[in-house]
Image (tube, rainbow, N blue to C red):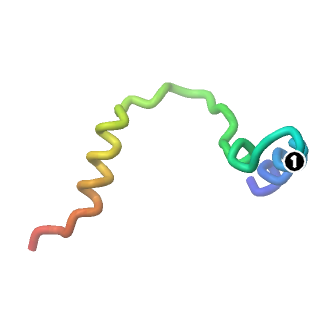
Amino acid sequence: MARRWRDRWLALSAKESMVMQRLQDAARSGAPATLSLEQVVSCFALACEQPEV
């Protein structure tokens, strides 16, 4: 996995792209996301709450 990242990083020259563009994941096959952004944020908020005793 690290080799893939390194190879991708080296394939893009510093003059051609910005750092954030270099760090983005490659496109993946499969089904699109089924949760909306609001649902994801709600899940994160719930996970960060203190548990009830």
Q: Residue at x 38, y 29 (%)?
A: 34
Q: Residue furthest left?
A: 53
> Is 28 positioned to the left or the right of 8 in the image?
left
* Quadrant of the rendered image containing residue 12: top right
Residue at 50%, 25% in the rendered image: 31
Q: Residue furthest bottom?
A: 53
Left or right side of 23 for 39: left
**Secondary structure category for the residue under label 1:** loop
Apparent side of residue 15 relative to residue 34 in the rendered image (left or right): right
Q: Nearer the viewer, residue 7 or 12?
A: 12
Residue 26 falls in which quadrant of the image?
A: top right
Residue 41, given in percent of the width and then of the height, sits at 32, 46
Residue 21's spot in the image, x, y percent?
71, 42
Residue of label 1: 14
Residue at 74% across, 53% down:
1
9 relative to 53, above or below: above
The front one of 14 and 2 is 14
- Quadrant where the C terminus sits is bottom left
Q: Nearer the viewer, residue 23 or 3?
A: 23
Count of residue discs: 1
Task: Tell me: residue 34, above or below residue 46.
Answer: above
- Which residue type carries mark 1? Ala
Task: Determine the image quadrant of residue 33.
Answer: top left
On the image, the x and y values in percent for residue 17 come to 80, 41
Find residue 36 and report its horizontal and vertical position in percent. Answer: 35, 32
Q: Residues within 10 Å of mark 1 (few under 14, many from 20)?
A: few
